[in-house]
């Protein structure tokens, strides 16, 4: 029992082949992503808005995936955090002339707090019940944003006219926004890469796979889910801040909509839940396809979400990157078994 | 103090709209009870029913209450096909795959409706749709009364089907103990297809009934899905009588909230009730505490 | 991903190449909703633009060069609109116009202001677009304030006819979108100025098509005027339910797009009768060529045009006029030309841009009031004058 | 009621190899049930009894050997196909429909068309065997005592008018007093001429009521024969206690 | 020998049914305690009560510290490791990742966790399959993986729930030897087991449960000859 099938009992540990490590570095691929988007800036200088919306959606989906993919608690209420981020920048800039970087910190803290409370209340719920509660909570926030005019400007909305400039950068310039969005996307990817390679990341996976077994590994599922939710919410809200500046005119309808929550979730699922780059791939696929269809196939752009998600769930249940990674894992094992 | 008559007026209004909520919710609940599938495309099937009623009215001049006879069987067939082609492949897979697939189906349906009918809201005008009758000082709208009546008939029919027929017993048996059902020779996959069909027939029937009352908008399905969830969670997921109670309750809560508090938060009242029930009594207000169906 | 990217690149480059190639025409950009939930208005816009281009180019275009429109579809969504705006800005078009929904036009206005490019709004009514406004944003259509203003003109005229005190109290019900809220705000503002009392103001959430709780409440208040602000679907549901609940008032006023569309009458049936509605343009307005334009639009669309088509028509002829006068096509010069606009005789009324009542670069056109009579819209009030008889609204029990 | 020479075999398992995934649990087991016979299949925990039963009732597919019902191969058929052919199963844990009445539960036993036509006859037979159920026929099955629930489970199986009845651990989870009661019920059913294969851990009781028995140990048959011969056989002790 | 685990009057009720009734037991460091009894006797329920997976009345102490109010994960952290009767690998993960998860409990960082995980995998002979998806493992290897996961938390008391079931004779022999070596290294082990061969070889002490009650306690030889035990196994209810 204390040895592999072939090794004789008591074989010196030095005789075994070098251990293959799991901790293959994600950094080269991250650098590739950074380079690709940087290239976008120079190759398509006339499509910066598209790049910004893509990177923001990818960032949200990657952040969503911390909770929905790595921890297995799908949420259909993440638009609430996008809206929270955008409105925090808008409200603080309009009323207190607060610098946007402080507003971003405030938004992240507020989102984290909301997630903590929200999680405390709902993590006892299982499966579908949790999903339903996320929809309900985001809906309620939308109604609050509409009805509490003094704070949010209500349906007419809130306009961001002036923002303090960090290092003399005009935050309203698409060029500056592009690099900030890229920075945001990379930040989210780095955070997710670090988290998922470490203790918390493995605890999240354990909770996703089997809570009882996770407890047997000494993991407190509620604590792990709360951490995942808090991180996911704070990162989503940070992207929401950028989006708020990008729009400069904030209205409850597009920001808090169920539609946005659904889009964030579906992008991550199509790309591959529980993979570092899956949400990014999903966002890129969907955004670019929608842009193509916008200019060529006109109306069908929302249809593709529906069709893709049905096809992915039926035929690629792990999503695009999930299936790819699984193949890589199998191949790597086959190689290590041969070598 | 506004007096008793307005209160009764509001109560009756809430109950009438609640009846329709119940009809939307009961199909969702039935499907969950038997198959453990949360159907996120439910509201889109309601929309499908509305559009079918509109097309039949515009093309053939059929009164919506007559087109029920076409819509319900059509819903049944479509539901069976969807279940067989898509959901049956996923029923035994744990996790949220059926939830996602129905979410995707909903998007497909609403966008196809959109491509066919455009974004412009569609409605049909029936002369009796604005008539009312007075009953003990309360004004009751004729269209809603008819809708309530049809709802009553449909839900009673469903109830009789479930309790008085061989098939209904088989459905309940499958819901309560699938292994037991298979052992007595019930073809449970067939029951699943059937139940999904019935659920969709009810959803489309609800759409038809709503057609003279409301406008059809391709993208409105999601809000009906949400209503259906609220109804079923209030009543207890999987419980048919619970869905009726939940629907009526939701109607009254919304109506009273809009009347006496603020109408802007109308939808929020239902959602608050929903969250409270979810947190404090997840088995639903009308469900039993011990046993799950 | 690679397979998708390639055609995408090709498309992007093609669009760039197209602008570089053809300089034998003057191009202006139009951002509108060709698809998505506002597509029906995009269609109206296209019809108006088509008619206007025919006229402009028949009359020699822009100083002899034909005028051309580059359409960008915003798919009824704000992200796509901003992407489209960037595309147009990068093509260095002298003027961009748009869009239908205020929720899309607001962020667009912010964007063009930041880019310091002129932007001409011709349909969105939200006050906030030009109040406070900016140097770069111009609007030729009436702001939401005008919707309320024209109906108060009707109320004043009715008070004059029936003696003071005929109409004093108002209840307002409105949707919670940006536009509806801003009309309802205008109602509060004007009522306070002119001595009316708003007894109650209620909003409702999107497609919350059951208004009975609100209407029951209104009924107990016995208002003189029921002021409604909502889009198409809701306007029909509202009138049907008002009839059903038996809410009586001396005036039912519909202060938004929904009530002025043919759909409203089709959907509401006889319940639509006697309702006053505000609209921005009709074939009956006392401007030259209104009837002919209406006929042409009808021919292009194959159905009754809405005022949005006329607004789009006005936008194109304004653009042609502005560009003909502009010293160059640089943003600053086009802006100067816009400021100097003075077109007294357009089919949409006199167009010039000025600052007034807190607005900036806003055309000051009055709106038009109609009343539904026997299932037809009848123009009753234009430019402060009663042009047709205004009928009293009978109680529901007497209809 | 011992084996009559030439009596027809209603149910026969020949040289079955069974298991789950890559785990083989049962090795080359053969057994049979004659008409009118109550046969016990006994063995300790994890000896493979339930696996054999699952294979017979179609819940798992045998990987080797055959299963014959009245001489016809039925290995690999789905449970409801087996039910149609006259094999009724009283499952472990009873698997009743708890929110339905006793009568509805019984009625569902005759769900399949051939039995449906003889439903009245079935009710009469079950109520005669179990008068208690008749008095409780309007009560929810979930509200009955464990012993009564077991009667409902047996009754439900009988409603099928089966050719053979197989029972999986009917005594599991029951208090000692109820175990005896249930065993007597099973004997009574057998006395009506119904062939029964009884899979049971409680060897003492089985050896008391059954006509014949097979003893399993670690997935292999170690002993079989008429129960009077088996009682007191030390092999049984060994099979159970590993001593 | 320090007392590793002590339970006093543990009682579990499911609705009206008493699944475990007032069971007490004690376990010393380095000892192996067997828990046996017929199907449905309440062995697994008792296990779940001791490790915190079901609500129970009564006292449970771990090295003198009361743990009966603690959540399962908290008991694991103190040093109570367990396997599950139906082995539950984290299906979506590789073998190494499966063991990495519990290994993180006492490791300072990923590198150390990986070392601990490899050590556990080597102990059970799965190191060469570290990168295989765990869903591809056969039953015997899944068992070993289950054991490696329990070992990776570096427990002081190990709960083994039917670890031997379904193993073929050579694998069984190997597993018995392995469990013995674990006890020799100072681990206290409590095992639910049906394979009598394993029980008699490993346990110096066994507790017999029937109908939720402790009916016998002693060495395997003594217990197995106890008439009440024999009756419980062969089915009592005899006059």
Image (tube, coloured by chain):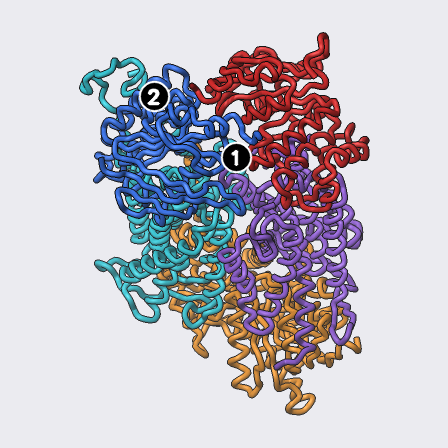
Chain colours: A cyan, B purple, C orange, D red, E blue
Q: Which residue corresponds to mark 2?
A: E201
Q: Residue at x 72, y 49 (%)?
A: B159
Dot 2 crowding, Cα within 10 Å, few <14, some 14–19, many 20+: few
How many numbered markers are drawn?
2
Question: From what the image shows, is residue D29 above or below residue A153?
Answer: above
Mark pair 2, 1: CA separation: 42 Å
Q: Work out whether residue A77 can be spotted.
A: yes
**Which image quarter: residue B140?**
bottom right
- Identify the chain of the residue marked 1, using the numbered disc in the image: B
Label placed on residue A157? none
Dot 1 crowding, Cα within 10 Å, few <14, some 14–19, many 20+: few
Question: From what the image shows, is residue C113 above or below residue B42?
Answer: below
Element type at mark 1: loop
Q: Residue at x 70, y 67 (%)?
A: C240
In the image, is A185 to the left or to the right of A121?
Answer: left
Spot occupied by residue A23 in the image (x, y as percentages of width and height)? 27, 32
Looking at the rendered image, the disc whose residue lies closer to the viewer, 2 or 1, is: 2
Q: Work out whether residue A41 can be spotted.
A: no
**Which image quarter: residue C53?**
bottom right
Label placed on residue B93? 1
């Amino acid at each position: 029992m204390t040895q592999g099938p072939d090794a004789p009992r008591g074989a010196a540990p030095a005789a075994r082949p070098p251990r293959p490590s799991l901790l293959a570095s994600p950094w080269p691929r991250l650098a590739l992503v950074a380079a690709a988007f940087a290239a976008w800036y120079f190759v398509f200088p006339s499509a910066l808005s598209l790049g910004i919306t893509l990177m923001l959606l990818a960032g949200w989906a990657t952040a969503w995936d911390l909770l929905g993919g790595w921890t297995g608690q799908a949420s259909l209420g993440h638009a609430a955090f996008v809206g929270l981020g955008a409105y925090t920048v808008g409200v603080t800039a309009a009323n207190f002339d607060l610098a946007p970087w402080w507003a971003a910190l405030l938004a992240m803290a507020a989102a984290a707090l909301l997630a903590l409370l929200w999680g405390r209340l709902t993590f006892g719920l299982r499966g579908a019940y949790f999903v339903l509660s996320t929809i309900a909570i985001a809906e309620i926030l939308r109604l609050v944003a509409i009805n509490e005019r003094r704070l949010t400007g209500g349906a007419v909305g809130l306009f961001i006219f002036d923002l303090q400039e960090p290092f003399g950068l005009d935050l309203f310039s698409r060029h500056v926004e592009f690099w900030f969005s890229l920075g945001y996307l990379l930040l989210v990817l780095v955070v997710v890469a670090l988290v998922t390679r470490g203790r918390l990341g493995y605890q999240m996976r354990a909770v996703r796979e089997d809570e009882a077994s996770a407890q047997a590994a000494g993991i407190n599922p509620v604590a792990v889910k709360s951490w995942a939710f808090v991180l996911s919410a704070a990162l989503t809200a940070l992207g929401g801040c950028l989006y708020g500046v990008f729009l400069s005119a904030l209205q409850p309808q597009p920001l808090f909509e169920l539609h946005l929550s659904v889009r964030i979730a579906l992008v991550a699922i199509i790309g591959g839940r529980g993979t570092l780059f899956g949400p990014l791939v999903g966002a890129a696929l969907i955004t670019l396809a929608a842009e193509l269809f916008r200019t060529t196939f006109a109306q069908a752009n929302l249809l593709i979400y529906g069709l893709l998600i049905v096809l992915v769930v039926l035929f690629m249940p792990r999503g695009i990157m999930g299936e790819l990674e699984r193949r890589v894992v199998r191949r790597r094992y086959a190689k290590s078994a041969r070598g | 103090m506004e007096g008793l008559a307005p209160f009764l007026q509001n109560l009756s209004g809430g109950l009438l709209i609640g009846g329709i909520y119940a009809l939307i919710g009961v199909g969702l609940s039935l499907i969950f009870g038997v198959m453990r599938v949360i159907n996120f495309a439910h509201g889109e099937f309601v929309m499908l029913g509305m559009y079918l009623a509109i097309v039949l009215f515009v093309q053939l001049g059929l009164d919506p209450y007559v087109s029920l006879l076409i819509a319900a069987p059509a819903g049944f067939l479509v539901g069976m096909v969807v279940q067989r082609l898509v959901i049956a492949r996923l029923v035994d897979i744990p996790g949220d795959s059926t939830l996602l697939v129905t979410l995707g189906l909903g998007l497909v349906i609403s966008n196809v409706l959109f491509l066919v009918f455009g974004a412009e809201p569609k409605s049909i005008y029936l002369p009796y749709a604005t008539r009312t009758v007075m009953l003990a000082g309360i004004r009751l709208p004729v269209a809603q009364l008819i809708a309530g009546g049809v709802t009553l008939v449909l839900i009673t029919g469903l109830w009789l089907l479930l309790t008085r027929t061989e098939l209904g017993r088989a459905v309940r048996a499958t819901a309560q103990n699938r292994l037991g059902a298979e052992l007595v020779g019930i073809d449970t996959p067939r029951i699943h297809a059937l139940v999904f069909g019935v659920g969709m027939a009810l959803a489309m029937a609800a759409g038809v009934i709503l057609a003279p009352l409301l406008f059809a908008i391709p993208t409105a399905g999601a809000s009906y899905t949400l209503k259906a969830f609220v109804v079923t969670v209030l009543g207890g997921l999987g419980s048919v009588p619970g869905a009726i109670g939940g629907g009526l309750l939701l109607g009254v809560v919304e109506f009273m909230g809009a009347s006496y508090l603020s109408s802007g938060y109308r939808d929020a009242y239902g959602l608050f009730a929903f969250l409270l029930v979810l947190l404090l009594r997840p088995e639903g207000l009308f469900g039993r505490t011990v046993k799950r169906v | 991903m690679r397979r998708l990217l390639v055609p995408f690149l090709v498309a992007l480059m093609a669009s760039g190449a197209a602008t570089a190639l053809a300089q034998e025409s003057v191009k202006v950009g139009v951002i509108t909703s060709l698809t998505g939930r506002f597509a029906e208005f995009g269609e109206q816009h296209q019809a108006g633009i088509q008619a206007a281009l025919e006229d402009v180019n028949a009359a020699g275009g822009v100083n002899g060069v034909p005028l051309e429109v580059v359409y960008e579809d915003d798919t009824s969504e704000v992200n796509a609109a901003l992407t489209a705006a960037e595309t147009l800005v990068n093509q260095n078009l002298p003027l961009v116009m748009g869009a239908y929904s205020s929720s899309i036009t607001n962020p667009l206005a912010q964007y063009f202001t930041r880019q310091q490019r002129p932007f001409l709004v011709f349909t969105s009514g939200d006050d906030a677009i030009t109040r406070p406004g900016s140097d770069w944003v111009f609007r030729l259509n009436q702001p939401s304030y005008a919707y309320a203003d024209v109906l108060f003109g009707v109320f004043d005229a009715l008070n004059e006819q029936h003696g003071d005190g005929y109409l004093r109290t108002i209840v307002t019900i409105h949707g919670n979108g940006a536009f509806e809220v801003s009309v309802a705000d205008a109602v509060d503002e004007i009522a306070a100025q002119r001595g009316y009392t708003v007894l109650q103001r209620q909003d409702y959430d999107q497609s919350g098509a059951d208004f009975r709780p609100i209407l029951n409440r209104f009924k107990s208040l016995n208002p003189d005027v029921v002021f409604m602000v909502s889009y198409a679907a809701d306007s029909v549901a509202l009138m049907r339910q008002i009839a059903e609940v038996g809410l009586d008032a001396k005036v039912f006023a519909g202060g938004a797009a929904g009530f002025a569309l043919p759909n409203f009458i089709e959907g509401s049936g006889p319940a639509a009768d006697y309702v006053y509605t505000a609209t921005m343009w009709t074939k009956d307005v006392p401007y030259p060529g209104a009837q002919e334009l209406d006929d042409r639009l009808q021919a292009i669309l194959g159905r009754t045009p809405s005022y949005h088509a006329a607004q789009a028509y006005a936008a194109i002829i304004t653009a042609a006029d502005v560009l003909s006068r502009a010293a160059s096509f640089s943003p600053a010069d086009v802006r100067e030309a816009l400021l100097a606009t003075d077109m007294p005789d357009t089919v949409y009324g006199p167009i010039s841009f000025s600052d007034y009542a807190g607005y900036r670069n806003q055309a000051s056109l009055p709106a038009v009031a109609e009343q539904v009579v026997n299932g037809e819209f009848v123009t009753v009030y234009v430019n402060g004058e009663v042009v047709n008889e205004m009928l009293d609204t009978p109680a529901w029990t007497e209809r | 009621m011992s084996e009559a020479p030439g009596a027809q075999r209603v149910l026969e398992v020949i040289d079955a190899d069974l298991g789950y995934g890559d785990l083989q649990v049962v090795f080359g087991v053969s057994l049979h049930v004659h008409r009118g016979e109550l046969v016990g299949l006994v063995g300790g925990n994890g000896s493979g009894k339930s696996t054999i039963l699952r294979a017979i009732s179609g819940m798992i597919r045998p990987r080797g050997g055959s299963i014959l019902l009245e001489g016809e191969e039925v290995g690999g058929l789905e449970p409801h196909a087996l039910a149609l052919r006259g094999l009724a199963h009283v499952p472990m844990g009873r698997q009743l429909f708890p929110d339905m009445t006793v009568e509805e539960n019984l009625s569902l036993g005759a769900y399949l068309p051939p039995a449906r036509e003889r439903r009245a006859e079935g009710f009469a037979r079950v109520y005669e065997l179990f008068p208690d159920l008749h008095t409780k026929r309007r009560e929810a099955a979930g509200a009955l005592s464990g012993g009564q629930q077991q009667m409902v489970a047996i009754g439900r199986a009988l409603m099928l008018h089966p050719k053979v009845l197989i029972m999986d651990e009917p005594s599991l989870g029951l208090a000692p007093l109820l175990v005896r009661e249930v065993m007597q019920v099973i004997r009574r059913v057998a006395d009506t001429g119904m062939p029964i294969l009884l899979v049971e851990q409680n060897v003492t009781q089985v050896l008391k009521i059954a006509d014949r028995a097979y003893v399993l140990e670690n997935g292999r048959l170690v002993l079989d024969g008429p129960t009077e011969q088996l009682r007191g056989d030390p092999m049984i002790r060994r099979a159970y206690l590993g001593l | 020998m320090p007392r590793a685990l002590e339970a006093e009057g543990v009682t579990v009720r499911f609705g009206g049914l008493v699944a475990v009734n007032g069971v007490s037991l004690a376990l010393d460091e380095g000892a192996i305690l067997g828990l046996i009894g017929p199907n449905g006797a309440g062995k697994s329920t008792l296990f779940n009560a001791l490790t915190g997976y079901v609500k129970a009345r009564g006292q449970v102490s771990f090295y003198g510290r009361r743990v009966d109010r603690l959540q399962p994960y908290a008991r694991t952290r103190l040093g109570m490791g367990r396997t599950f009767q139906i082995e539950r690998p984290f299906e979506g993960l590789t073998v190494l990742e499966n063991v990495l998860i519990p290994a993180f409990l006492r490791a300072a960082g990923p590198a150390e966790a990986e070392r601990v995980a490899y050590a556990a995998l080597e102990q059970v002979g799965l190191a060469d399959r570290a990168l295989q998806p765990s869903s591809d493992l056969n039953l015997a290897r899944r068992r070993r993986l289950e054991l490696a996961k329990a070992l990776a938390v570096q427990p002081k008391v190990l709960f083994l729930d039917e670890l031997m079931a379904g193993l073929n004779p050579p694998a069984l022999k190997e597993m018995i030897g392995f469990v013995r070596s674990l006890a020799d290294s100072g681990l206290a082990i409590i095992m639910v087991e049906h394979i009598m061969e394993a029980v008699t070889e490993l346990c110096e002490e066994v507790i017999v449960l029937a109908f939720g009650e402790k009916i016998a306690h002693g060495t395997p030889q003594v217990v197995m000859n106890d008439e009440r035990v024999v009756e419980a196994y062969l089915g009592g209810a005899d006059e």
